[in-house]
């Protein structure tokens, strides 16, 4: 029996935290599973077997024409999966099909976590049990193997753990049953049979032997007998022996001893050190079994003996035996976690982490190579050799640790006496609960209750205003200064509006300049649409030559395009080569003047020269005052404005939207500026710029909530205001600014929700910030899907807040046992279940129902486009298109930047370069971070991660969760990425940096305050220094050379 004292309600108290952990792990797997097919050979084999099982009938699945080397156990699951595909007409290898095929193994990961928690909760404190469970279900080794690769080893390991639990509890019939199921799933279960024999050897009860073997035999035969009807009695033995001998290689991409010495995919019969690989592998396997058996017999009276011996055996078999696949080290990983529960030595966690890492490197590398159609790792591959050597070193360390643990004196509970520094204190739960209860009584509230404090704690005195005169003064100065800077040279308020749109091939416009002119440059401004046209030149209007073709494609919309004919002509003819484009204005220049050459007359083919409608070509020359000689970003689109500004215009005019890879709301925000100021650079940029201005009071308010004092709130506000990316990214007419703005808002209000308790204020008042967080979540998601990443962070923070309320409820229940007359705690006990339920229902409204409605309403401009293809069904198709675009995008770009480069700013993104700047002058727009903000900011993030495990501060936890919920998903995105994708993380990085600056300053405020002021001034001065490269201001190349700090910082 397991030792430990039971406490009423303890099991129930575990549930909320446990289910939250499992739910988070399940969501992670749901996100990962459909992104990749997985290991193609395995997944397509499982798919073929599932389809075949359903088509032929389960018990006739082992046909001669089908390769099928798995035992019958998992075929029952595959049959169900095949039936689901056929009954519901799910296309094989579609997104949902891949998810469905990986679902059993993904769920098995969670069951492994549940089994670990059940054991750990008997040995550790609640926090320790949670921590170990998290370390298992979030272990990349598990989700890489099940949810990405698509293998079923986790299902096998469930029954292995249950088998070993049965041995520990001396329930041998149960253990035999679990082992039989494991063998039915994977032949590797046979390797663990000797442990059952060793456990039974001590039992002199013949009945125990009979029950074990009888139960095991019946459990094994029941699923197998139906197949024997078709295949005969001996078939099952042939299947197992055939499977065990079907891969005659020393190593099959397993990074082990044989891989280290050139045996990867080498015939196992080839000689190696006087013997063959096969002989050495057999020696290794038998030696591992003997050593593990000796260890098991040495410590068999101690709880966890089977888990430790089996873990070492499985690791040894992988590293020392032949015919090992890359995945077979997986079996040791959950066993090491289970062994740690009973032995408590932290060195076991080191082995667990070490083998998890080498497994991820091994399996991940093989998987990535398979996607490149490279299925055999070369024998001299550097990574394989290094990881193989690490595995051997880890195995030696693990066995040394095993011998050490075997020699220790253990008490009845199985915990080593005289626990040293390397071992975890495994105090029984009753002691933990008692200390928790005493702490709760002393505090009068739950440790997790996060309230706003003052002077760095965010607490507001009763009746005080959150923002005072000083706050409005600070914010006002920053807003005015930044608004002026941001609006200077934002863009011209003028752009050509009228246009010529030819409807026929060869339709043309002939321009008479009045006399022969030198034409050195032609600038044209195109609208939406795509097509082709060409310029022809003539001196007499009869003979035309010097054709210059122009492709008016998506890269030239709402911007000035230039060609340089360098010809002399009186007449210019613009000929339609392919219809579909709109041309707004054309201007002819020579080198003698920056003003357009005057146009004497314009004639449109097939038109009436005396009619404005008939002579539509005249519209090409009716706004010559707006035609620049040297086009710049001030009078046209640049970078992704060609998509987003164009689509905003199309939404406004009920034209089929060109950009369909993002939701429409961000472009609708842009269209508001166009509606107000016209289709010109100021119009399409002004709204985003104002949203950037709005971020300043938002981050100031966030800082005030977190840090309490106005001076402290000023620190993140200054750092964020003068961050380079905040400036560059909000002045370009793309949709990132809207997503980031609403990400900031939703986390602000979720933090606000966490600082109030429904025990202390009216329940409906807590719903206001909670509902606003949900409202801004959907507005952001309808602008850009990056906000969905943050939705996971909101869910975690909500769970933490409700867990805090639950802790108070639990403390109240303990408290009233001693003080039943305490009305406050009696009230907490009464209202908690009801208030929690109401809060979850409110979440259903504000995070599901209202978001669905708002998201749908954002498609109104799309639905207003005339013609078919704009109904509700098409909106759903739109979502599928967006997902497929981002998940399957394959592209290259010279300024692309993977996620690990972003915080270090290895590769900034170069948005714009002026075409006609003088030779020694540069006019560029670059987006990246302020080095005095990003580099120390990322250090602050890393330090926060380190400190969060040493001393919990809920403010840091909120910021870290917000940061990681936006950052971690990008680590799993295979598509092309850029540094501007980091913009969503910057506000929370700045707030974490500010936290530690304030923390440092408060140690010695008299002397350190001036250093903080100097630091802020340095960030502002750096912004001023780099301002030309953030704004497009022309400067000399010598000046920009001083700003070339890293090799990837290319500006011209």
Image: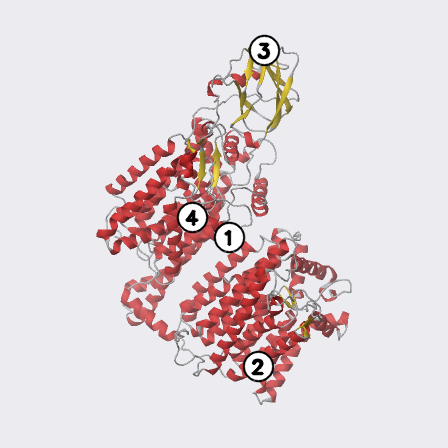
Name the mark nearer the viewer: 1 or 3. Answer: 1
> How far from the left and from the top, in percent, is residue 222?
68, 74
Residue ID for mark 1: 971
> How far from the left and from the top, in percent, is residue 234?
75, 75
Which badge, 1 or 3, comes first in the chain's sequence?
A: 3
Name the mark nearer the viewer: 3 or 2. Answer: 2
Which badge, 4 or 1, comes first in the chain's sequence?
A: 1
Q: Is residue 510 visible?
A: no
> How far from the left and from the top, in percent, is residue 96?
61, 53
Which badge, 4 or 2, comes first in the chain's sequence?
A: 2
Residue ID for mark 3: 609
Residue ID for mark 2: 293
- Residue 855 higher or lower than 289, as above or below: above
Residue 993 relative to residue 646: left or right: left
Name the foreground residue: 600 vs 140: 600
Residue 180 relative to residue 584: left or right: right
Residue ID for mark 4: 985
- Kind of element beneath mark 2: helix
Name the mark nearer the viewer: 3 or 4. Answer: 4
């Amino acid at each position: 029996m397991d030792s430990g004292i039971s406490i009423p309600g303890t099991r129930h108290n575990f549930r909320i935290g446990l289910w939250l952990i499992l739910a988070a792990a399940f969501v992670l797997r749901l996100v990962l599973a459909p992104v990749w097919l997985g290991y193609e050979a395995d997944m397509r084999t499982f798919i073929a077997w599932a389809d075949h099982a359903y088509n032929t009938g389960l018990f006739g699945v082992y046909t001669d024409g089908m390769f099928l080397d798995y035992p019958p156990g998992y075929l029952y699951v595959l049959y169900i999966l095949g039936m689901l595909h056929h009954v519901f007409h799910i296309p094989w290898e579609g997104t949902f099909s891949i998810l469905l095929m990986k679902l059993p193994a993904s769920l098995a990961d969670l069951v492994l976590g549940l089994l670990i928690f059940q054991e750990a909760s008997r040995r550790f404190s609640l926090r320790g049990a949670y921590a170990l469970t998290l370390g298992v279900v979030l272990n990349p080794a598990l989700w890489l193997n099940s949810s990405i690769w698509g293998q079923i080893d986790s299902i096998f390991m469930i029954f292995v753990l249950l088998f070993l639990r049965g041995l520990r509890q001396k329930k041998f019939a149960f253990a035999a049953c679990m082992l039989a199921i494991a063998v039915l799933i994977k032949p590797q279960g046979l390797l663990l049979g000797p442990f059952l024999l060793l456990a039974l050897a001590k039992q002199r009860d013949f009945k125990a032997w009979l029950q074990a073997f009888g139960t095991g035999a019946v459990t094994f035969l029941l699923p197998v007998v139906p197949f024997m009807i078709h295949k005969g009695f001996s078939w099952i033995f042939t299947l197992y022996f055939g499977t065990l001998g079907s891969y005659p290689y020393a190593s099959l991409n397993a990074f082990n001893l044989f891989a280290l010495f050139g045996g990867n995919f080498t015939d196992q019969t080839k000689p190696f050190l006087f013997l063959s690989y096969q002989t050495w592998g057999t020696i290794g396997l038998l030696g591992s079994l003997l050593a593990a058996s000796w260890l098991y017999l040495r410590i068999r009276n101690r709880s966890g003996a089977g888990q430790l011996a089996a873990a070492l055996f499985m690791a040894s078999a992988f590293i020392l035996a032949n015919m090992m696949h890359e995945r077979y080290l997986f079996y040791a990983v959950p066993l090491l976690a289970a062994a740690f529960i009973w032995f408590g030595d932290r060195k076991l966690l080191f082995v667990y982490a070490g083998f998890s890492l080498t497994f991820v490197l091994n399996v991940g590398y093989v998987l990535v190579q398979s996607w490149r159609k490279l299925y055999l790792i070369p024998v001299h591959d550097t990574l394989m050799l290094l990881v193989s050597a690490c595995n051997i070193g880890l195995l030696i360390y693990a066995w040394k640790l095993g011998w050490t643990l075997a020699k220790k004196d253990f008490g009845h509970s199985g915990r080593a006496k005289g626990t040293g520094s390397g071992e975890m204190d495994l105090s029984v739960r009753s002691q933990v609960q008692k200390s928790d209860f005493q702490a709760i009584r002393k505090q009068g509230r739950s440790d997790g209750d996060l309230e706003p404090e003052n002077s760095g704690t965010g607490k507001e005195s009763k009746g005080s205003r959150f923002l005072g005169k000083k706050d409005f003064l600070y914010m006002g100065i920053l807003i005015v200064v930044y608004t002026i800077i941001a609006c200077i040279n934002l863009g011209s308020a003028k752009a050509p509006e009228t246009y010529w749109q030819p409807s026929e091939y060869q339709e043309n416009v002939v321009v008479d300049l009045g006399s022969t002119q030198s034409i050195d440059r032609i600038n044209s401004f195109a609208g939406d649409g795509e097509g082709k046209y060409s310029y022809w030149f003539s001196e007499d209007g009869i003979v035309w030559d010097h054709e210059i073709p122009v492709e008016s494609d998506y890269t030239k919309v709402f911007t000035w395009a230039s060609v340089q004919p360098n010809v002399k002509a009186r007449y210019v003819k613009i000929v339609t080569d392919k219809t579909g484009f709109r041309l707004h204005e054309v201007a002819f220049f020579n080198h003698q003047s920056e003003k357009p050459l005057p146009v004497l007359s314009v004639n449109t083919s097939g038109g009436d020269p005396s009619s404005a409608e008939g002579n539509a070509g005249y519209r090409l020359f009716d706004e010559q005052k707006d035609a620049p000689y040297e086009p710049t970003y001030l009078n046209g689109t640049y970078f992704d404005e060609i998509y987003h500004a164009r689509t905003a215009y199309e939404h406004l005019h009920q034209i089929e939207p060109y950009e369909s890879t993002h939701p429409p709301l961000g472009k609708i925000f842009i269209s508001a500026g166009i509606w107000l100021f016209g289709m010109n650079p100021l119009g399409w940029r002004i709204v985003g710029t104002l949203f950037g201005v709005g971020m300043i009071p938002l981050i100031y308010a966030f800082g005030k909530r977190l840090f309490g004092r106005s001076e402290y709130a000023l620190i993140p506000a200054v750092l964020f205001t003068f961050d380079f990316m905040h400036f560059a990214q909000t002045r370009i007419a793309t949709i990132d600014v809207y997503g980031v703005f609403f990400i900031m808002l939703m986390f602000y209000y979720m933090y606000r929700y966490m600082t109030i308790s429904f025990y202390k204020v009216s329940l409906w008042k807590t719903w206001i910030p909670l509902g606003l967080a949900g409202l801004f979540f959907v507005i952001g998601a309808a602008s850009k899907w990056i906000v969905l990443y943050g939705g996971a962070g909101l869910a975690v923070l909500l769970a933490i807040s409700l867990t805090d309320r639950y802790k108070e409820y639990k403390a109240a229940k303990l408290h009233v046992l001693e003080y039943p007359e305490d009305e406050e705690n009696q009230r907490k006990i009464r209202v908690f279940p009801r208030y929690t339920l109401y809060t979850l229902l409110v979440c259903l409204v504000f995070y599901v129902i209202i978001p669905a409605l708002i998201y749908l309403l954002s498609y109104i401009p799309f639905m207003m486009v005339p013609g078919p293809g704009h109904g509700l069904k098409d909106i759903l198709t739109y979502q599928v298109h967006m997902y497929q675009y981002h998940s399957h995008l394959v592209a290259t770009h010279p300024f692309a930047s993977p996620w690990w480069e972003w915080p270090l700013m290895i590769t900034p993104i170069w948005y714009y370069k002026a075409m006609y700047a003088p030779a020694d002058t540069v006019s560029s727009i670059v987006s990246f971070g302020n080095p005095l903000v990003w580099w120390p900011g990322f250090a602050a993030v890393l330090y926060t991660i380190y400190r969060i495990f040493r001393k919990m501060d809920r403010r840091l936890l909120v910021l870290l969760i917000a940061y990681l919920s936006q950052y971690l998903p990008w680590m799993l995105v295979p598509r092309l990425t850029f540094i501007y994708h980091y913009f969503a993380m910057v506000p929370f990085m700045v707030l974490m940096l500010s936290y530690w600056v304030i923390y440092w300053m408060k140690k010695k405020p008299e002397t350190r305050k001036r250093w903080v002021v100097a630091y802020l001034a340095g960030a502002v001065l750096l912004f001023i220094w780099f301002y030309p490269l953030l704004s497009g201001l022309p400067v000399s190349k010598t000046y920009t050379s001083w700003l070339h700090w890293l090799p990837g910082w290319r500006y011209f």
